[in-house]
Amino acid sequence: MSRIIMISPGLGRCYELQAHCVMDEPEAPPLESVTAWHPMLVALLEFYLPSGWRLSPELLLNRMPLRVDIVVLRLVDQPAGNARKLHSIFGHLRHHTLIEHKGPTDDLEPEDVLTLLAYGALYMRHNKLLDPDELCLMVIADRIPAGFARQVERHRGTFAPVGRGLWRGELNGLLLHGVETREACRQSPTEHLLYTFSRAYLKGAGQIMPLDPEETQVYNALYQQVEQFRRQRGTMAMKDYELARQSYEEVLEQMVAQLPPEKLLAKLTPEQRIEGLTPEQRFEGLTPEEILRAIPPEVRELIAKKLRRGEPQE
């Protein structure tokens, strides 16, 4: 157990002394709902993560009095592989990188600077890091507002845009990197899927099309990760679920509409192929023998029995 003494100004020239005991195992603060875009970001980073790196989602240091979604990227093997995509993120990592992500329904606030500072300091303490050059603080959001940059400056730090949707600076001796998804997604095909994490995606999800085969696979995996998170944690643990589902279905409809008829048929089950057809349409073009072969044996036997019973008696 450790004891922290806090001195705060009281009335006149007097000061108040407050002693706080910090137990080794404090109670964790109640968890807030996680935006549906957080598991999506985890899935995206995991798919394209270069070799040699390890991803840990949802870092929650229970000594903190608040909840924040943090993704940790940590170098565990050298030499690390080269990134194929998402260079706006993977091209700016240090041995340890803490990423705070804001979904398209949330704004990056000045208070998030304090969150990053606190998490960065506690992360270094827990992992026995003394060199600030080993850690990078990163923010990923639709945009980086002026209020966030001004708060960095209040802490004697720097943070400024460097073009292509990227920001660069320093906070308390730590590298500070920012990615504006609304701009970064347009800069290169390698950053295309970042459109999913921009505010424009909510207004026109279909604008992400066209997707190449790999991007289609990844895009479907993003939403599958949302559904998996919801099943494991429950609906109350996630916010923005309906928005994510509706946006995904908008893109899915366009994917299906662009499929050639033969590929679309190949993806349907036999039941789905005949769903909505009239009995006449279902059997159109079939010979009596083909229709008979399509009938299950037990059904054919019942039909035969009924026919035998209906035969005139001699």
Image (cartoon, grey):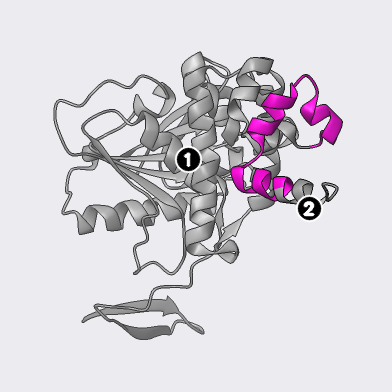
From which residue to which does the magenta span run?
Answer: 276-304
56 sits left or right of 297 in the view = left
Residue 243, visible in the rendered structure: yes
Between marks 2 and 1 in the image, the one whose residue lies nearer the viewer = 2
Indicate the quadrant containing the N terminus: top left, top right, bottom left or bottom right: bottom left
Identify the residue under disc 1: 41
C-alpha distance separating marks 2 and 1: 67 Å
Looking at the image, tell me whether mark 2 or mark 1 is earlier in sequence order.
1
| Front residue of this view, candidates 170 and 39 | 39
Question: In percent of the image, x 52 and y 43: which residue is there?
Answer: 224
The amino acid type, in three-letter code, at marker 1 is Leu
Our reading of the magenta stretch's main secondary structure is helix
Relative vertical location of residue 266 with respect to residue 303 in this rendering, above or below: above
Q: Which mark is residue 309?
A: 2
Does the magenta segment cover residue 299?
Answer: yes
Q: Residue 307: x percent and y percent?
A: 78, 46
Does the magenta segment cover residue 110?
Answer: no
136 sits left or right of 195 in the view = left
Residue 150, visible in the rendered structure: no
| Front residue of this view, candidates 267 and 228 | 267
84 sits left or right of 282 in the view = left
What element does badge 2 sit on? Answer: helix
The amino acid type, in three-letter code, at marker 2 is Arg
Question: In percent of the image, x 53 and y 17: which residue is there?
Answer: 212
Question: In percent of the image, x 18 and y 49: which residue is there?
Answer: 129
Q: Residues within 10 Å of mark 1 (few under 14, many from 20)?
A: many
298 sits left or right of 41 in the view = right
Quadrant of res 123: bottom left
Relative vertical location of residue 60 with respect to residue 94 in this rendering, above or below: below
Relative vertical location of residue 253 with respect to residue 261 in this rendering, above or below: below
Quadrant of res 81: top left
Q: Are marks 2 and 1 in contact (CB under 8 Å)?
A: no
